[in-house]
Amino acid sequence: MTIPYPEVATRTAVRIVDLYKSYSNGVVSVPAVRGVSIALDRGSFTAVMGPSGSGKSTLLSCAAGLDVPTRGRVIVGERDISSLSSDALTRFRRDHVGFVFQAYNLIDHLPVVDNVALPVVLAGREPDTRRLAELLESVGLAGMENRLPGELSGGQAQRAAIARALFTRPDVVFADEPTGALDSHSAAQVLEVLRSSARDLDQTVVLVTHDPGVAAVADQVLFLADGLLVDQLDQPSAEQIAAIMLALGR
């Protein structure tokens, strides 16, 4: 299934064109994503769902520039990142892409404030302390700036990871199962932070999830099966999402 992208490219934040990704198991090449084409508007919130092994995380990694497609194009803004060198891709990703991992990936010996500022520091820039304070307050971590990751709850750690992803004001934020290990209250807080970044900051958010309730927060849901884009729902309900997942053999 192909979702045509709009003619006005300036409103398109992410374009994926005929994307293929295969992995070798040492004997044969195993396809993970097969000919997927999508386009996502700036400020949109998109969930990606599908059965286990459908290619969700692979698609997200390729779109974020963390993995290199076997074939096809990934365009973020007006930049074709699939044609960039490794060094250029690293620099582009640092400045334009945020990624939230399910495992948080916080640095254990750094306090929250330094974990959030880390991408800017690694880029050789001075962190904007006012922006940093405002961001920590917006994700509910005001007063926890000097806590180490080991002193945070799961929800607090994930919100710190989201703050880190948002601190560089990226064009696109990708999140891989960001609520998968959280209780319902913490998950709701994390989703509200991501929802507000799309709504209020015109940032594009793309998240992979297995939870229909989480996906129902999104503007649209894309469904993968066997590496193919097979369905889409706009302004979905949890019940509609669950019905499609059941039909796909979740």
Image: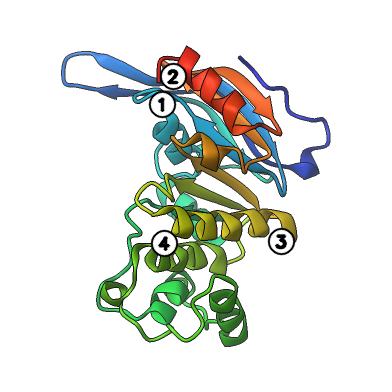
* Distance from the alpha carbon under mark 3 to that under mark 4: 20 Å
Residue at (56, 30) in percent of width and height: 73
The percent position of residue 16, horizontal first and vertical second, equals: 59, 31
Q: How is the image coloured?
A: rainbow
Placement of 92 over or under 213, stated as above or below: below
Check if mark 3's residue and mark 4's residue have beta carbons within 8 Å.
Answer: no
SS of the residue under disc 2 = loop
Q: Amino acid at mark 1?
A: Gly
Q: Quadrant of the C terminus?
A: top left
User: Where is residue 145, by image quadrant?
Assistant: bottom left
Marks 3/1: CA–CA distance: 29 Å
Q: Which residue is mark 3?
A: 201
Numbered disc 3: secondary structure: helix
Q: Is residue 191 left or right of residue 113?
A: right
Q: Mark 1 or mark 4, which is nearer to you?
A: 4
Residue with the most extreme left position: 26
Of badges 2 and 4, the one in the foreground is 4
Report whether residue 69 is seen: no
In the rendered image, which residue does mark 2 sit on? 227
**Which quadrant would the N terminus be assigned to in this image?**
top right
Between the C-alphas of marks 1 and 2, the distance is 5 Å
Residue position for label 4: 158
Mark nearer the N terminus (1 vs 2): 1
**Residue 29 position within the rendered picture, expressed as x and y whole percent measured from the top left:** 28, 16
